[in-house]
Image (cartoon, helix red, strand yellow):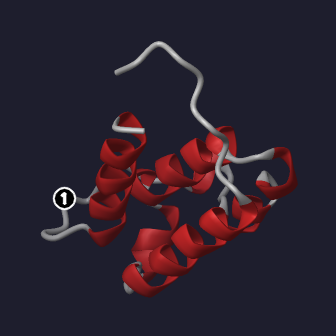
Amino acid sequence: MSGGKRKPLAKRDVAALLDRLDNAALRPECRSCECLQGFLAQMELDAADCAKALPVGRKVAPKAMHACLGCEPCPPAEIFAAYLLGRRHR
């Protein structure tokens, strides 16, 4: 990874990632899984100021979150991993 600061995620990019998550998280358990919730937290950190609020409505309280259930496949985790790899190469 380069030591430079990465460009913040634009509002349209955050919205597109959230749409992908909404379509991928088919089971109710996905919404409160640490896989999806971790990605939401990362997006919030990486987002431009105008986009930071977008993931907030999908976050759950820490007490409502559960550990990964080990689903095969785990679409939210796969989207998160692809996102991290993409950010790494920018």
How far across and how far down the image is residue 20, in percent? 46, 78
What's the residue at 34%, 21% (across, down)? 1
What's the residue at 79%, 57% (across, down)? 51
Q: Is residue 6 left or right of residue 69?
A: right
Residue on which the image places disc 1: 70
Q: Residue furthest left?
A: 72
Q: Residues within 10 Å of mark 1 (few under 14, many from 20)?
A: few
Q: Residue furthest top?
A: 3
What's the residue at 29%, 71% (across, down)? 75
How far across and how far down the image is residue 74, in percent? 24, 67
Front one among 61 and 44 = 44
* Image quadrant where one finds the C terminus: top left
Residue type at mark 1 is Gly
How far across and how far down the image is residue 66, in percent? 44, 53
In which quadrant of the rendered view does residue 12 lie? bottom right
Up the image or down, 50 lies above or below 41; here it is below
Front one among 72 and 16 = 16
Q: Is residue 29 left or right of residue 68?
A: right
- Tag 1's secondary structure? loop
